[in-house]
């Protein structure tokens, strides 16, 4: 099966998740800076969530450029990724309502961990279909950055119960590490195009 429908579903769910997050943002009750300061933590959490969803979407887009066809091995991890991304609005609202308490901040890490694991399973499923010599497998290599990100999310979940703001700082650090688009796939595809493989 061609990957077009899977890409369309992913784009739709990501757009809805981002829209729901922004609709949940509280409006300041004061017209001055004090009102804006009161909602600043939630605005920052929204910005972090927007960036995280964007990072997953951006990397998913690049990954799917290497895919010629999909089957159930690809569709289920993709659905799992969408499930966890669709939970982002829920955990953002919970963090806001609970004043960034330990459990909601840890839950945010759990959602990011689930999304990261699903994404890695999706990569493996694509590699299984297209082979170790396929574009994605060649581009990913060891994928140490993804593994380190996963470890950081898990560590942040535990740290949330020590100090939620330390956990949030770790989530921000992982986002910063991924904010520059990962060019491995593009570079691999350019190299293959030059070699006449695609």
Image (cartoon, helix red, strand yellow):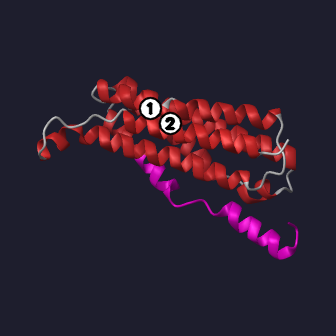
Relative to residue 88, is residue 72 drawn left or right? Answer: right
Q: Provide the residue designation for mark 1.
A: 89
- Circles 2 and 1 in contact, beta carbons < 8 Å: yes
Marks 2 and 1 sit apart, C-alpha to C-alpha, by 7 Å
Q: Provide the residue designation for mark 2.
A: 17
Residue drawn 86% across and 44% down? Answer: 129
- Residue 161 visible (yes or no): no
Element type at marker 2? helix
**Can you tell which quarter of the image residue 89 is in?**
top left
Examine the structure image and report whether residue 179 is included in the region drawn in magenta. yes
Return the x and y of residue 34 as percentages of the image width and height. 12, 42
Per the rendered image, the range of residues in magenta is: 172-198
Residue drawn 46% across and 48% down? Answer: 51
Element type at marker 1? helix
Residue drawn 50% across and 41% down? Answer: 152
Quadrant for the N terminus, please: top right
Q: Is residue 140 above or below residue 159?
A: below
* Badge 2: residue crowd in 10 Å (few <14, some 14–19, many ≥20): many
Q: Is residue 89 above or below residue 136?
A: above
Relative to residue 153, is residue 102 drawn left or right? Answer: left
Return the x and y of residue 40 as percentages of the image width and height. 25, 42
Residue that lies at the very extreme toward the bottom in this rendered image: 194
């Amino acid at each position: 099966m061609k990957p077009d429908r899977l890409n369309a579903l992913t784009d739709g769910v990501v757009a809805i998740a981002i829209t729901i997050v922004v609709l949940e943002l509280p409006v300041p009750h004061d017209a001055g800076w004090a009102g804006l300061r009161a909602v600043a933590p939630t605005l920052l959490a929204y910005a972090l969530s927007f960036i995280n969803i964007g990072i997953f979407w951006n990397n998913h887009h690049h990954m799917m450029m290497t895919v010629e066809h999909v089957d159930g091995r690809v569709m289920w991890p993709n659905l799992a990724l969408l499930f966890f991304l669709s939970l982002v609005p829920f955990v953002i609202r919970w963090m806001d309502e609970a004043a960034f308490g330990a459990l909601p901040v840890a839950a945010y890490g759990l959602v990011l961990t689930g999304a990261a694991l699903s994404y890695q399973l999706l990569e493996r499923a694509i590699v299984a279909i297209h082979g170790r010599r396929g574009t994605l497998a060649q581009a990913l290599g060891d994928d140490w950055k993804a593994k380190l990100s996963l470890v950081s999310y898990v560590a942040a979940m535990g740290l949330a119960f020590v100090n939620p703001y330390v956990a949030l700082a770790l989530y921000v650090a992982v986002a910063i590490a991924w904010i520059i688009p990962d060019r491995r796939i593009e570079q691999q595809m350019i190299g293959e195009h030059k070699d006449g493989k695609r």
